[in-house]
Each structure stands twice: as structure tokens, then as C-alpha cells.
């Protein structure tokens, strides 16, 4: 099993996603002889999971059923154990696009945190690219190494435990892009410039506060970065539903019906538009925004390393 290569069959040692519903799923490490408890009953790994195909519908001991899904970076973002605040798919998608990442790209990241963005970056640059990720906290760095190894992507990522603001990324002149998610990103801009290739590259800084953005932009200008711009991504979800509205009485419907010989009492005419007019309502499909939405997560500041 690998997060960057799809496997058809569930094997011992795999990480799988137990899908109970769109709002209820969780990861599980498949191990021979182990059982997993769900609200629908017990899942026995040896008989219910190992050897089955990903996407299979598994019946639990109480008669309920779940789906077993192959892990992806998107599913992992929704289900990972939170060691820090994480980035979600809305921000991750714009980051990978604006950094112009592709298979074969070399990326530097700090900090690693819970690994949400890291998994998406690894999947984007695979199979020939590489991610160099720096984490200040030793326990988080060790846990990230362990997860990357379990997820079959350790050959695509190098985890370093150090202070990026003081010691940099440990590499120079090789990166196509740099991403910063640290409390004081302006202190790491010089190291980011050193990590980028001499022919240029892209940088992104994620900061929740506008004061951090201001200081980061000033540092980018000082180190010669160009095309500096800041974005905030707000996701607004719409529900599509049927709306019924009353039709205003303009005083012409009755006259038009009598002129055309329309008989509203005729059963064959009950479903016609004229019948709806007679009843005074019309139905149509409409997109309605949710009453609540996810608000501010952070500001994304992008820039390009100047060639001059």
C-alpha cells in the first residue's frame, strides 16, 4: 500500500479508511488477528479485510456494513491524528497550483506539523520528485517519519528536525518551490531563497494574522522576490433544492385562458404550466448557500525568486 500508488488488494500492514458515512470515517492499520470496533459491530481484520479489494462493502458483527477505502491525501487530511492545526484541501489545492508543482519537482517545507500538506505535496511530485520537510519539534518529526514509512512514501521525503529560521532547510540551490507555515516566516525568507534554484522558483507563506503577512512581504521585497501577492480562500457551499414561489396576479391569465379555450378542470391539463399558473405557484431548481460556512483559515502569500 502506498499513498502515491493505488493498490487493489488490502494487505497486512496497510493503512485503510473505514467509511461509515460522509461525516463519519476513520483510519485503521490492518493487522492480522486484530479487530476494530464500530457502531455497527466488530470488523475482524484477518477475515473481513486482508485479501479483500479496496472499496469492498464489509458486513460487521451486528449486521451493519461499512466500506473500506484506499487512502488518499484528501482522505488522510480528513482523518489524520491532529498534532497541530492543519491545512485542508481548499488551501492545499491553491498552494499546489500557485507553486506550479508537477511530477519531478523538488519542494522544501516547514513545518511538517501533522503531515496534511506533506502527503499532498508528495503525491504531486511523485514519482521522481522529492520533499524536504523541516520540523522544529522532535517528537512531531519522529512521528512524521514513522507515518511516511507506514504509508510507503519514505523514499520521496526527507524529514529534518531543526529550526528553519536559524539553520535553513539543509539544502541549497535545488528547490523548485518553498512553503512556510511557521510563526515568524520573515525570519526564514533568506534561507528559502538559498534553497531555491539559481534560475528561480516560487515561494508560499501561510499565516493566520495580517501582521505576519505584512512583515513577510517586507522581507520578500528585501531579498529580491517579485510578483508578491496575498490570497484568502473562502469556500462557500450551495445546496441545490426545489423552490416554490407564488406567481403575481397581473390580471391577464384568466383572459388568456378563455381566449385559448384552456379548461383547468380537465384532469389532462392538471400538470401543465397553465395549471400551475391557475394554482398561483411555480417550482424551479435553485442554489441556496448554507446558513453557516468555514470562515478565515489563513492568508497565503506567494512570490517569485527574481533572476536578477
Image (tube, grey):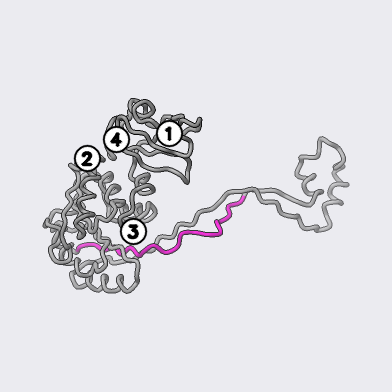
Q: Measuring 40% from the left and 32% from the top, which residue is drawn there?
A: 43
Residue indicated by mark 2: 127
Tally of numbered tags: 4
Among the two numbered marks 3 and 1 on one chain, the one whose residue lies closer to the N terminus: 1
Crowdedness of circle 3 by 10 Å Cα count: few (<14), some, many (20+)? few
- Pointers 3 and 1 in contact (CB under 8 A)? no
- Check residue 297 for magenta coloring: yes
> SS for tag 3?
loop
Q: Is residue 117 left or right of residue 21?
A: left
Tell me: 223 left or right of 54: left
Q: Quadrant of residue 233?
A: bottom left
Residue at the (15%, 58%) spot, across then down: 169
Q: Which mark is residue 42?
A: 1
Mark 2 Cα-neighbour bin, 10 Å: few <14, some 14–19, many ≥20: some
> Which numbered circle lies on residue 85?
3
Residue at numbered disc 4: 14
Distance from the alpha carbon under mark 1 to that under mark 2: 37 Å
Amino acid at each position: 500500500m502506498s499513498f502515491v500508488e493505488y493498490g487493489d488488494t488490502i494487505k497486512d500492514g496497510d493503512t485503510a479508511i473505514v467509511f461509515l458515512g460522509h461525516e463519519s470515517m476513520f483510519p485503521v492499520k490492518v493487522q492480522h488477528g486484530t479487530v476494530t470496533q464500530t457502531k455497527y459491530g466488530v470488523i475482524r481484520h484477518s477475515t473481513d479485510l486482508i485479501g479483500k479489494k479496496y472499496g469492498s462493502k464489509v458486513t460487521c458483527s451486528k449486521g451493519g456494513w461499512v466500506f473500506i477505502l484506499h487512502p488518499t491525501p484528501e482522505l488522510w487530511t480528513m482523518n489524520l491524528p491532529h498534532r497541530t492545526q492543519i491545512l485542508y484541501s481548499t488551501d492545499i489545492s491553491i498552494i499546489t497550483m500557485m507553486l506550479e508543482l508537477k511530477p519531478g519537482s523538488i519542494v522544501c517545507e516547514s513545518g511538517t506539523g501533522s503531515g496534511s500538506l506533506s502527503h499532498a505535496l508528495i503525491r504531486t511530485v511523485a514519482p521522481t520528485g522529492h520533499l524536504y520537510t523541516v520540523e522544529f519539534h522532535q517528537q512531531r518529526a519522529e512521528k512524521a517519519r514513522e507515518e511516511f514509512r507506514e504509508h510507503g512514501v519514505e523514499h520521496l521525503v526527507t524529514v529534518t528536525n531543526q529550526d528553519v529560521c536559524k539553520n535553513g532547510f539543509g539544502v541549497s540551490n535545488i528547490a523548485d518551490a518553498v512553503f512556510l507555515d511557521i510563526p515568524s516566516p520573515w525570519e526564514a525568507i533568506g534561507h528559502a531563497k538559498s534553497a531555491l534554484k539559481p534560475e528561480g522558483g516560487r515561494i508560499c507563506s501561510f499565516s493566520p494574522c495580517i501582521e505576519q503577512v505584512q512583515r513577510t512581504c517586507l522581507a520578500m521585497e528585501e531579498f529580491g522576490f517579485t510578483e508578491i501577492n496575498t490570497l484568502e480562500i473562502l469556500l462557500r457551499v450551495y445546496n441545490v433544492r426545489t423552490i416554490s414561489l407564488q406567481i403575481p396576479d397581473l390580471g391577464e391569465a384568466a383572459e388568456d385562458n378563455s381566449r385559448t379555450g384552456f379548461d383547468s378542470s380537465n384532469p389532462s391539463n392538471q400538470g401543465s404550466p397553465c395549471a400551475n399558473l391557475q394554482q398561483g405557484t411555480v417550482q424551479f431548481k435553485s442554489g441556496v448557500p448554507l446558513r453557516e460556512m468555514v470562515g478565515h483559515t489563513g492568508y497565503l502569500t506567494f512570490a517569485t525568486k527574481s533572476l536578477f
